[in-house]
Image: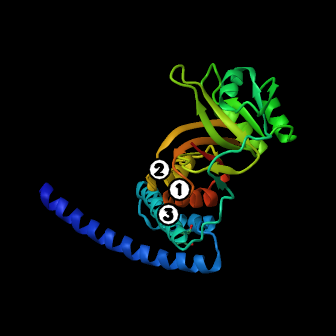
């Protein structure tokens, strides 16, 4: 039997070669990024990746290794894409998100919809001159906002029994609204409310971001999309999903992150998710 230390020495030698080859490959993908920066071609090229995975998997000599090579290259290509998104951001190729930053919200001559569960909080949140309109539920408040009978909707963030936010966030996404602020009553109980509007506005100093996107019920689909968050060192505070189609099974994921849309880590992740996730939306960047 070979000595463990000797085997490990051989492994170390091979790993050095892998790192060298990886770095050579990254030099080439940087050149690909330069090409994409000047031509506007999308970073993610699914067709190329699928054919690459098939060709490298075919080079291996056993089913186990073939599977392993596939997994390894999925990861290598995902790292190469992330470097390309970084370069795009550094070259100012981040297409604006359309959010307008304001120092404070103007409630003069404004009206807001609320529901019974948010009445007391709405009265303490809005200045007296702001008109308040009572609605039966979240959906009615959204309809009233949609018809522009009010400028804002002020609604409880969570479902009171389950504590979930997904049904409410889903309405924000479906109506194409934005979350402008999260209001918490203090000290206890800490009830949370959302200020919602049709305007894509963000308050200065916003440090929370809500996003949503869709992903199929396929092995690794969420894992790959979430790697844009981990790779950019982003902190995720919440993840919830709802089923949006049963056949085939598709999910819409809702995530709350810490950060501001001007942070380069957020820009990198947004570039990646925009490119690779279906129906990616930023629901709000708020405090
Ligand atoms: C490098 C490229 O960009 C991406 C990364 C790939 C890779 O690392 O091999 C392949 C396709 C693209 O999704 C490319 O387009 O060739």
| Cβ atoms at labels 2 and 1 below 8 Å apart | yes
> What crowding class fits label 1: few (fewer than 14 Cα within 10 Å), some (14-19), or many (20 or more)?
many
> What crowding class fits label 2: few (fewer than 14 Cα within 10 Å), some (14-19), or many (20 or more)?
some
Q: From the viewer's perspective, is residue 25 above or below residue 227? A: below
Q: From the viewer's perspective, is residue 12 above or below residue 140? A: below
Residue 254 image-quadrant placement: top right
Report if residue 229 is visible in the image. Answer: yes
Image region (quadrant) for ligand 1:
bottom right
Position of 202 with respect to 13 (left or right) is right
Q: Looking at the rendering, in which quadrant would you find the C terminus?
A: top right
Q: Looking at the rendering, in which quadrant would you find the N terminus?
A: bottom left
- Residue where numbered disc 3 is placed: 82
Q: x and y percent of residue 16 in the render?
A: 27, 69
Tell me if the residue at label 2 has its CB under 8 Å from ligand 1: no
Position of 58 with respect to 135 (left or right) is left
Which mark is nearer the camera, 3 or 2?
A: 2
Which label belongs to residue 266? 1
Q: Secondary structure at mark 3?
A: helix
Which label belongs to residue 149? none
Q: From the viewer's perspective, is residue 150 above or below residue 212? A: above
Q: Mark 2 vs mark 1: which is more N-terminal?
A: 2
Which label belongs to residue 234? 2
Foreground residue among 281 and 26: 281
Image point 52% across, 20% down: which residue?
188
Q: From the viewer's perspective, is residue 234 above or below residue 83? A: above
């Amino acid at each position: 039997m070979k000595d463990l230390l000797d085997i490990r020495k051989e492994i170390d030698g091979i790993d050095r070669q892998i790192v060298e080859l990886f770095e050579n490959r990254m030099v080439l993908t940087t050149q690909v990024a330069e090409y994409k920066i000047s031509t506007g071609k999308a970073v993610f090229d699914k067709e190329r990746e699928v054919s690459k995975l098939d060709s490298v998997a075919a080079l291996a000599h056993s089913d186990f290794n073939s599977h392993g090579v596939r997994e390894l290259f999925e990861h290598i290509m995902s790292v190469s894409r992330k470097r390309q998104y970084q370069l795009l951001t550094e070259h100012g190729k981040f297409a604006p998100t359309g959010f307008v930053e304001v120092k404070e919200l103007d409630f003069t001559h404004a009206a807001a919809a609320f529901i019974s569960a948010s009445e007391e909080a709405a009265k303490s949140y809005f200045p007296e001159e702001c008109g308040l309109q009572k609605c039966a539920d979240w959906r009615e408040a959204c309809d009233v906002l949609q018809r522009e009978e009010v400028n804002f909707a002020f609604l409880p963030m969570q479902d009171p029994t389950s504590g979930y936010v997904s049904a409410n966030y889903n309405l924000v996404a479906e109506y194409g609204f934005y979350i402008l602020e999260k209001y918490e009553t203090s000290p206890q109980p800490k009830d949370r409310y959302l200020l919602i509007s049709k305007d894509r506005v963000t308050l200065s100093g916003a440090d929370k971001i809500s996003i949503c996107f869709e992903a199929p019920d396929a092995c690794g689909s969420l894992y790959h999309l979430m790697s844009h968050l981990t790779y950019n060192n982003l902190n995720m505070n919440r993840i919830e999903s709802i089923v949006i189609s049963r056949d085939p099974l598709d999910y819409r994921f809702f995530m709350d992150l810490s950060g501001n849309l001007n942070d380069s880590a957020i820009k990198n992740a947004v570039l990646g998710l925009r490119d690779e996730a279906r129906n990616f939306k930023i629901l709000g960047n708020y405090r």
